[in-house]
Image: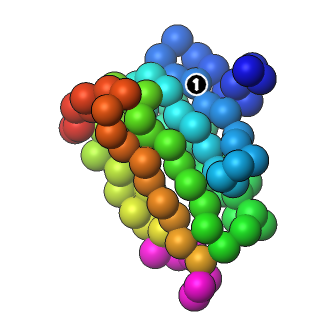
Amino acid sequence: MRPPVYADALLRIWHTADPPGLRVAGQVDLTNQVALMGHLLTLDAAPAVLTVDLREVTFLNFPSLHALVSFAHLLEPGRRLILHTGPRSSPTCC
């Protein structure tokens, strides 16, 4: 496995090729939400469907959730953002 493109004490982010997008693990909070959004913005030139795998996220604060939704709303027509959540973790929010 490749090393993450971002890592701090709480969060790790990897760029993914198949599917194109991000894999995120750990906790997203005020100390690192800007890093997540910055890496999301680098995907702007990616294909029509972008995927963010949040299955290893254990905490996601409300501002980060809001930023993900806002990013999806700002995508051009025909593009979409898919968020994967599920059995790898049971995230808490806010």
Residue 64 visible in the shown view: no
Indicate left or right for 2 with 8 as reference.
Answer: right
Please tell me in which quadrant of the rendered image residue 27 appears. Answer: top left
Q: Is residue 78 above or below residue 29?
A: below
Residue 26: x and y, percent? 44, 23
Quarter holding the N terminus is: top right
Residue at image mark 1 = 12
Q: Image check: 76 left or right of 29?
A: right
Magenta residue check for 60: no
Residue 89 image point, x, y percent: 32, 27
Dominant SS of magenta comes to loop
Q: Position of residue 13 (x, y in %)?
A: 61, 31
Q: Amino acid at mark 1?
A: Arg
Task: Using the image, determine if residue 79 lies above or below residue 11.
Answer: below
Q: Residue at x 22, y 38 (%)?
A: 94
Q: Magenta span covers which residues?
A: 73-78
Q: Is residue 69 visible?
A: yes
Quarter of the rendering containing residue 69: bottom left
Say which quarter of the image contains residue 14: top right
Q: Residue at x 23, y 37 (%)?
A: 93
Q: What residue is rendered at 70% in x and 43% in y? A: 16
